[in-house]
Amino acid sequence: MEHTISQAELVIMKMLWAQSPLSAVQINEQIRDQNWRMATVKTLINRLLKKGFISYEQQGRTYYYQPVIEKSAYLEAQNESFLNDLYDGRLSDMLAAFTQQERLSSKEIEELKNIIDDMEHSS
């Protein structure tokens, strides 16, 4: 399985993670705000099939698509890849970079403290 999903493919994956199985027509109807033609939707579906992220089941003349990989598993792999590629696997470096660029609210700081507390108590 290829490891990445393009931004356009992700639109379809998010839809299938939320609700599946769906046909190409159903997918196209739900993403009208993208202004994609049916041919574009089918191209993206075919790419996802080729990459192994989705599978299909044929019912009559209609194909229904569903994800092969769970959203949580994909996110975990992408998070790990991002962390390793850009921050040499160091979560503290990533957090430092993010917090230097954007000011955290008091609530966000408290949430991070709670996450760290939970991690300390579960080790």
Image: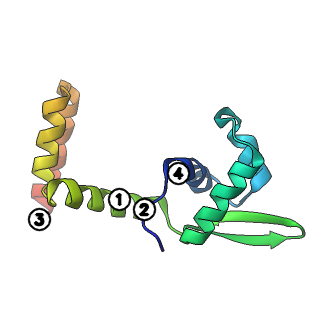
Determine whether the residue tagged by mark 3 lies in a helix, strand or loop: loop
Whether residue 113 is visible, yes or no, is no
Q: Residue at x 46, y 70 (%)?
A: 2
Task: Name the side, left or right, on which 106 lies relative to 65.
Answer: left
Q: Secondary structure at mark 2?
A: helix
Tag 3 residue: 123
Residue at 17% across / 52% down in the picture?
118
- Mark 2–mark 3 Cα distance, whole angstroms, equals 25 Å
- Residue at the image position 59 percent from the left and 63 percent from the top: 48
Residue matched to label 4: 10
Secondary structure category for the residue under label 1: helix
Position in image of residue 95 (x %, y %): 15, 43
- Marks 3/1: CA distance? 24 Å
Q: CA distance from mark 1 to mark 4?
A: 13 Å
Q: Check the image and name the residue furthest to the right.
A: 60
Mark 3: few, some, or many residues within 10 Å (few <14, many ≥20)? few
Mark 3 or mark 1, whichever is nearer to me: 1
